[in-house]
Amino acid sequence: MDPMPIPRDFLLPLPAAEGDLELALVVLFLAHILLVNLMLGGALLTLAAEVRGLTRPAYDRLARTIAATVTVNKSLAVVLGVGPLLAINALYGLWFYTANALTGRAWILLVPLIASAFLLLYLHKYTWDALAGRKGLHLAIGAAGTLLLLAAPLVFLANVNLMLFPGRWGEVRGFLSAVALANVLPRYLHFLLASLAVAALFLAGWLCRRGFDFAAELPGLDRVAVKRELLGVALGATAAQLLAGPLVLLTLPPHGLSWLLLGNLAVAIAFAAAALVLLWRESGIEGPLGPRFWLVVVLLGGTVGLMGLGRHLYREQALTPHRELVAAHTADFRAASLGAEMRLAAGTPRLGPGETAASPGEKIFRASCMACHDVETKRVGPPLREIAGIYAGNPDGLIAWVKAPGRKRAGYPEMPPITMQPPQYEAVAAYILDEVFATPSESG
């Protein structure tokens, strides 16, 4: 019995070149996840600012300004999410579909969950004035929308993680058991920290830029103080990511790791470390944002890009063994299908109820070869006596011909290649050369 489920491939062509789809998956996913980070981090910072606004009303205005960015980023995140979803389904349909099926209801509930989160966040945004005297209710609406928003990435992350480890599929009994797999919660923590860092960095650049009329839009707040606070959030969240990152790496099954991936991660960490130093220096400067800030953006952008590439490298490495098993099962299935079609076309009956194949080689021969070859007489192809004479004492030559046949003589059609596993080739060659003709003739 197989130690893990091994499905057969879809046997359908990809809609585009595999390299193009891989590039699209990495690029579109990065664009999507960046906007998800802005949306989710912005929602968390909105709540934090609104709570602070209970004692300092100027922060309530800041919370409202941040909330306006959340709804825009939310819409863009949804639109850009279609691209990587299509690409991952095209490239990894078997694995992604299986993970979705195993998480069951959680996957099905994603659409109403996300829709409910969006509606609550819109309600929170557009009732700011109406519920000004009922801040507890207003905060509860925003918190409920944010909590639902936090649940959606966890479902996606659990599914994407689960698809990488077919050996664990037999253990999974729904969403909670998928979340309990070792790597899920560390990756989720890393994602939440990234969301805070990206959103804080974006808001510092947006609200503290020279062209933003800070005094008019956010009266009662100091531009430098807000810049320092937002850069402090970005600094703290990025530093925490450097601590959470090794936890993610240590909980990844090692079969997906490679030297290329580790080198990629080392460069990403170096970029992030350099960004931390520059963030620290920038946060201590009085006045508007300086050139260091934009260098930080470039460095962290490079880190995000390398992390996205690293995910793809790990995914490819982790799935390679199972892909090979799927390819082997697909080849067996196609060979059995071809044998059945050939028997049907030639009118060759299957083994009867009381019949048994004398050996594995005979069984394979009956399934895949018997429709075209008889022992003594010509069918579609030459009889086995001729074949045994040609390849007497040379089973490797017979196997090479079966793998890549051609057309040797007039009166016979060109033989199609027969796809089997190495032991099957060896068994059928032994059957023809050693069982049917223990002492083959030299005719032919």
Image (cartoon, rainbow, N blue to C red):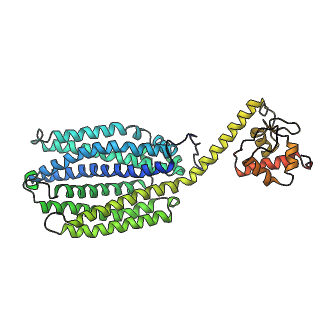
Q: Percent x, y for residue 229?
A: 18, 61
The residue located at (75%, 52%) in the rendering is 400
The answer to whether any part of residue 443 appears in the image is yes
Say if 442 sits above or below 286 in the image: above
The residue located at (24%, 51%) in the rendering is 42
Q: Nearer the viewer, residue 224 or 131?
A: 224
Say if 222 sits above or below 425 in the image: below
- Judge left or right: residue 332 versus residue 281: right
Q: Nearer the viewer, residue 224 or 26?
A: 26
Q: Nearer the viewer, residue 215 or 434?
A: 215
Q: Nearer the viewer, residue 301 or 327?
A: 301
- Judge left or right: residue 291 versus residue 410: left
The answer to whether any part of residue 182 appears in the image is no
Q: Percent x, y for residue 79?
A: 33, 42
Q: Percent x, y for residue 442?
A: 92, 49
Q: Percent x, y for residue 125?
A: 18, 42
Say if 46 sits above or below 244 in the image: above
Residue sitting at the far front: 410
